Image (spheres, grey):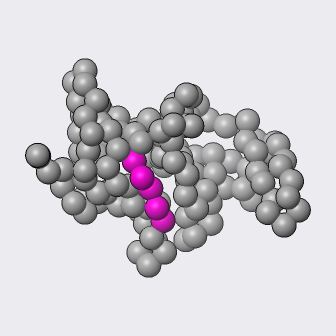
Amino acid sequence: MTWTYDLRAGEWTIEDTVTPDLPVGAYLSPWGRAVYDETARRSVITADGVVAGYDAARHEWEILSSFSGGVTGPKQGCTTVYDPTSGRIIAIGGSAQILDNWVEMNDVWAFNTGTGTWSELLAQSTP
């Protein structure tokens, strides 16, 4: 189910949309993040190793990418911001699943929603 909020009217609306199976579950609240991609004019969420975009004009979700941040398992809990200068979503830190352990990360990645590609901006450092 997808809800949209109209800031001008101060009202929530349930959208008539089919939401793909996004593995956000319980992770969306504490771990998932949302930003608005000004270039593509859509909301984008990152949650539990997935990046998904919502096109409100078409009422459609789209899986844009998986996100592992250069590690073998999913990455979650990143701080995400939209950089209007580069038109990319910047993901900072978070936790990554490495084998059976969750490891706190201090790396920085950029996601280009137009090309669906990730670029490492700052590598994970070791203490």
In the image, is residue 38 above or below residue 124?
below
- The residue drawn where x is 18% and y is 50% is 124
Q: Does residue 117 appear anywhere in the picture?
A: no
Residue 84 percent across, percent down from the top left: 48, 75
Predominant secondary structure, magenta span: strand
Q: Position of residue 39 (x, y in %)?
A: 55, 71
Q: Nearer the viewer, residue 94 or 72?
A: 94
Left or right of 64? Residue 67 is left
| Residue positioned most to the bottom | 85
Quarter of the image holding residue 55? Answer: bottom right
Q: Give how far across and how far down residue 68 sits, in percent.
A: 32, 41
- Indicate yes or no whether the magenta region holds residue 80: yes
Residue, far left: 127
Q: Position of residue 36 (x, y in %)?
A: 58, 62
Instruction: Identify the residue at the far top of this view.
Output: 100
- Quarter of the figure with the N terminus: top right
The answer to which of 106 and 1 lies nearer the viewer is 106
Locate residue 4 relative to residue 88 in the image: left or right.
Answer: right
Q: Give above or below for 54 relative to 40.
A: above
Left or right, 36 with respect to 3, comes to left
Is residue 5 in view from this perspective?
A: yes
* Quarter assignment of residue 96: top left
Q: Is residue 103 above or below residue 3?
A: above
Q: Residue at x 55, y 52 (%)?
A: 34
Magenta residues, as a range? Answer: 78-82
> Residue at left 26%, top 44%?
105
Q: Residue at x 67, y 37 (%)?
A: 19
